[in-house]
Amino acid sequence: MSLFAIGMVMLLIYIHINNTLLTV
């Protein structure tokens, strides 16, 4: 995986965690 792909995955996980914390 390229560095860009890793960055995109990390960003998606970060957003998902934030959304979960905000809803709960």
Image (cartoon, grey):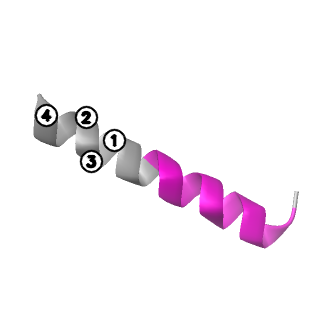
In the rendered structure, the answer to whether residue 9 lies left or right of residue 24 reads right
Q: Where is mark 4, residue-wise?
A: 23
> How far is disc 3 from disc 2 in space, using C-alphas?
5 Å
Q: Are the residues tagged 3 and 1 within 8 Å (C-beta)?
A: yes
Q: Where is mark 2, residue-wise?
A: 20
Task: Name the kind of residue labelled 3 in the image.
Answer: Asn
- Residue shown at 41% from the left, 52% from the top: 14
In the rendered structure, the answer to whether residue 23 lies left or right of residue 20 reads left
Residue 2 rendering spot, x and y as whole percentages: 86, 66
* Magenta residue check for 10: yes
Secondary element at tag 1: helix
Q: Are the residues tagged 3 and 2 within 8 Å (C-beta)?
A: yes
Could you tell me which quadrant the N terminus lies in? Answer: bottom right
In the rendered structure, the answer to whether residue 5 lies left or right of residue 16 reads right
Task: Name the kind of residue labelled 4 in the image.
Answer: Thr
Q: Earlier in the sequence, mark 4 or mark 3?
A: 3
Task: Name the kind of residue labelled 1 in the image.
Answer: Ile
Q: Where is mark 3, residue-wise?
A: 18
What segment is highlighted magenta in the picture?
2-13
Q: What secondary structure prevails in the magenta region?
A: helix
Q: Which mark is residue 17?
A: 1
11 over 22 or under it: above or below: below
- Residue shown at 71% from the left, 59% from the top: 6
